[in-house]
Image (cartoon, rainbow, N blue to C red):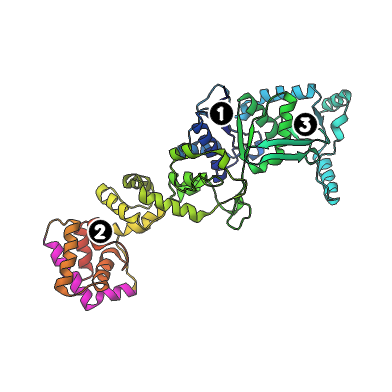
Amino acid sequence: MTQAVRVRFAPSPTGLMHLGSLRTALYDYLLARKTNGQFILRIEDTDQNRLVEGSIENLIDSLKILGINCDEGPEIGGNYGPYIQSQRLEIYHQHINELLDKGLAYHCFCTKEELDQHRQAQMNLKQNPKYSGKCRSLTPDEIKAKIDAGLDYVIRLKMPEDRTFSFNDAIRNKVEIDSSLVDDQVILKSDGFPTYHLAAVVDDHLMQITHVLRGEEWLPSTPKHIYLYECFGWTPPIWVHLPLLLNTDRSKLSKRHGDFSVQNYLNLGYLKESIINFVALLGWHSAEDRELFTLEELVNEFSIERVNKAGAIFDITKLEWMNGWYMRNLDVKYIAQEAKPFFTKANIDVSDHNKYLKVIATAREYASTLIQLIDFSKVYYQDFTLSDEDLAIVKEENSQKVLSWFHIKLKAQAEWTKDEINALVKEAIATLGIKGKHLYFPLRIALYGSSHGPEIPTLIDNLGLNEAIRRLSLFL
Ligand code: GLU
């Protein structure tokens, strides 16, 4: 029997969850769901200097909002916990001691100044900066003396020399990296915390992770990880290095160049459906190059074989297009519900639910985000001021005829269906002999504040009869 897939999303809590991390989490999730495997959330907080308060909560919340549910993790527990690395220090220390005992790792007492000097000298000689190896051959007595003297130290992994590390990556196939490019990695820092490299390998093994999905930036570190597996006598997982995210000019997407957090896109009024769909296509494509997928459809379609090697272009205009599509095609009640917090924040009272639904149904034809719905909706709730040009149009003699005719007609009946209003428009054309923009522009300007926009029956229906009559009278 083949082993069930176990994948982990292992973010460091260093800020708000961004779309690049979301992609890793999503691909993990899709692979796990597709194979009936397990999706694990593990918090990698061993770099205590980079911790940002609130980021663990933000990571967990973002996944929850997007419906990417994990099977094991800090909140829900599981058989392989704890799932927060700072709560696993004892485990790492045991493993580091094992490496020390086997002579595969060593104490290093070099100071920051020494390391910096050496690095600078190497850079001046245009050499690849690497640890000098100075502490590799300290004797046990020398080590003891230095520890007794209270010197700070780290533990380094003794990387083999003259060796080519060759491994398979599910996306890149065979990868070879020469050991001359690989440093004697620090595995335990002077603060007693392990580094990512040691902690991730130990956890991936103990948590029985079968596939490691992570960003391409970790590819050069993979030899260190493979070597750690070797030192412990463990079998490495399947490596899956996901392509870089690029700007439209193909430069590397940098967190400094914008706020790519999930939270930011939610705040801007993007739907979770489009965020997920958009992120899924950052480096993966379906067999038939289809673009629109629900999360369930992605679970069915996803496969690692169709993740690309080449960098994935992050094109925000595509997200906008997708969001507009979802806004127009999902159930209007759902869109109205998702949009409500934005209206509340904008102080627009949408308590008349019937009216609100009608307004959203119209506004979503024009808006591509939930926030933009407000731009196309507030006119149904608030008075507006006209441009000079529009004001001139409503003042024209024919315009006044049109407005007054509709004013009288609409008042004559307690209720009007959209069909009846449609018929009324036809009647106006026949009776007044005014048609086209000479009829529509003044009506739309008076009712909606702009000569362009929805059809007249829709406008009157959305406003409600009384408000429509009031607006017509305002311009007479
Ligand atoms: N903690 C690492 C990061 O946030 C995870 C890399 C990995 O998935 O192994 O980049």
SS class of the residue under badge 3?
A: strand
Q: Does residue 151 lie above or below 52 as drawn?
A: above
| Residue 195 visible within the image | no
Residue shown at the point (59%, 38%) measured from the top left: 13
Give the spatial CA distance, label 1 vs label 2.
Answer: 53 Å
Q: Nearer the viewer, mark 1 or mark 2?
A: 1
Labelled disc at residue 245: none
Labelled disc at residue 157: 3
Q: Does residue 346 lie above or below 470 as drawn?
A: above
Give the mark, 2 or 3, whose residue is nearer the N terminus: 3
**Percent of width and height locating residue 119:** 82, 45
Residue shown at the point (54%, 41%) measured from the top left: 22
Q: Which residue is mark 2?
A: 458
Residue shown at the point (81%, 35%) measured from the top left: 163
Q: Which residue is mark 1?
A: 5
Give the spatial CA distance, label 3 vs label 1.
Answer: 29 Å
Q: Nearer the viewer, residue 135 or 53?
A: 135
- The amino acid marked with disc number 1 is Val
**Percent of width and height locating residue 337:** 34, 44
SS class of the residue under badge 1?
A: loop
Give the spatial CA distance, label 2 vs label 3.
Answer: 71 Å
Which residue occupies the extreme front position in the image? Answer: 288
Give the mark, 1 or 2, whose residue is nearer the N terminus: 1
409 magenta-colored: yes
- The amino acid marked with disc number 3 is Leu
- The amino acid marked with disc number 2 is Thr
Give the mark, 3 or 1, whose residue is nearer the N terminus: 1
